[in-house]
Image (cartoon, rainbow, N blue to C red):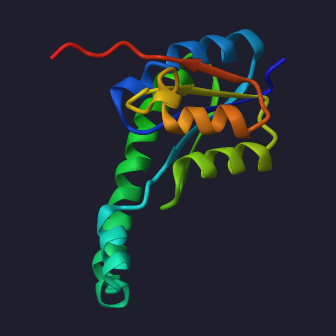
Amino acid sequence: MFEKILVCLDGSKLAEQILPYATEQALKFGSKVTLLQVMSVPSSIAMASVAGALPQTGDVVEEEVKRREDEIRTYLDGVAKPMIKQGIDVESVQLGPSQPAEAIVQYAQDNSFNLICIATHGHSGLGRAVFGSVADYVLRQSGLPIMVIKPEEAES
């Protein structure tokens, strides 16, 4: 039923709580899993662009983006290992820097996914009391089946 599953991660332990559910679906249906993390626009880029100083800070921004790309690649490779050990066909993809919600929807539609798996943080806003802003956008805009969980908060 689900040939291709897109698992959206943001590097947090809360987001990783979707992994057992995605793994179960992949094992049940023999699905290919794509682990996706979108690099949000680094604050250094946002601040530089607001200040109109982007051309002068190009090297610093480029170094920050490269550093984040390396971190994301290492993170996704680590997340993929247990799934690969279970025999799941897994690939890791990083996108950005860009707006995560829009990038997830575009990537899912462009690559013909059958299911999107995402955990919601549900941080704030009355309209987003049930879903976080990214999960809410993906749910409303993707037109695809979505598996959404509200993760358990870790104890301090």
Between residue 66 and residue 139, name the one nearer to us.
139
Q: Which residue is drawn at 31% across and 67% down?
A: 64
Q: Which residue is drawn at 54% across and 22% down?
A: 83
Q: In which quarter of the image is residue 49?
A: bottom left
Between residue 10 and residue 50, name the one nearer to us.
50
Q: In which quarter of the image is the N terminus?
A: top right
Left or right? Give the position of 60 relative to 31. left
Q: Residue at x 57, y 13 (%)?
A: 21
Left or right? Give the position of 79 relative to 67. right
Image coords of residue 13 (percent x, y): 34, 26
Q: Please, which residue is most extreme toward the front here? A: 126
Image coords of residue 109 (percent x, y): 78, 45
Between residue 82 and residue 125, name the one nearer to us.
125
Image coords of residue 32 (percent x, y): 71, 29
Q: Residue at x 29, y 84 (%)?
A: 57
Relative to 101, residue 63 above or below: below
